Amino acid sequence: MVYPDRAAAGRVLGTALEHLRDARPVVLGLPRGGVPVAAAVAAEIGGELDVLLVRKLGLPWQPELAMAALGETGVLVLNRDVVERGGVTEEAFDEVERAERAELARRQAALRTTEPIPLTGRTVVIVDDGMATGATVVAACRVARAQRPERLVVAMPVSSPEAARRVRRECDELVCLWTPAELGGVGMAYNDFHQLTDDEVTELLS
């Protein structure tokens, strides 16, 4: 299963979330790549669209592989297996964390053009373009949980089996369209997997 682009994936994902339409959910895209998926989901099921800012802390020599993730409220989720297998020193970890905290602050300034939609008592759907390790989405779930939503759903076009197992423990419902046994990277699920700009994200949110 290969999607033409993120918006197409979001439209397909939206059809799998029709059971949430009456709840008028808050659909949270994880910037940047999750926002076009979330926008398409919100258009399909009539939800409100917002962003939830988290940053992946990648291995210094393999940035796409998450050793941890950071949420906008300061939540830090550690992927201990990756840290231990990679032999990451405390100094190396701290250097990556400092850089990602700075980038998270920059994105808050660039993308938070309005106040976040309150999540308390709402059905919340967290959407990204896919999950490799799940660390970023776990951080997002914990950030959202702190606001006491009524129901927390994670919706993904694609995920590794390991990430799906990890994230399922953090939410009330996981909807994932494709869980290939070997996921070389989320980009393998898309024909168009270009890196989005801040402008593209803010345009979708507006």
Image (spheres, helix red, strand yellow):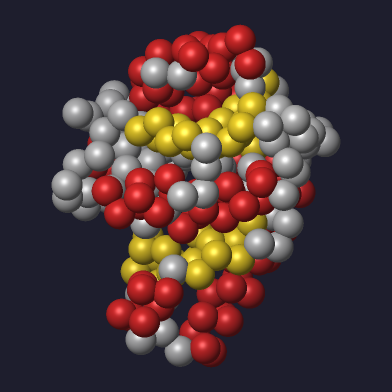
Q: Residue at x 75, y 30 (%)?
A: 121
In the rendered view of the protein, which quadrant contains the C terminus? top right
In the rendered view of the protein, which quadrant contains the N terminus? top left
Q: Is residue 12 above or below residue 77?
A: above
Q: Residue at x 40, y 31 (%)?
A: 175
Q: Position of residue 104 (x, y in %)?
A: 66, 57
Quadrant in the rendering for residue 21 = top right
Q: Position of residue 144 (x, y in %)?
A: 66, 44
Front residue of 132 and 97: 132
Q: Position of residue 131 (x, y in %)?
A: 38, 47
As drawn, which residue projects farthest toward the left?
181
Front residue of 54 and 139: 139
Front residue of 188 and 26: 26
As drawn, which residue projects farthest toward the right?
115
Q: How many marks?
A: 0
Q: Is residue 122 above or below residue 91?
A: above
Q: Residue at x 64, y 27 (%)?
A: 123
Residue 106 seen in the figure: no
Residue 59 seen in the figure: yes
Q: Position of residue 138 (x, y in %)?
A: 51, 53
Q: Is residue 151 above or below residue 166?
A: above
Q: Is residue 185 left or right of residue 103?
A: left
Quadrant in the rendering for residue 202 = top right
Q: Is residue 129 above or below residue 74?
A: above
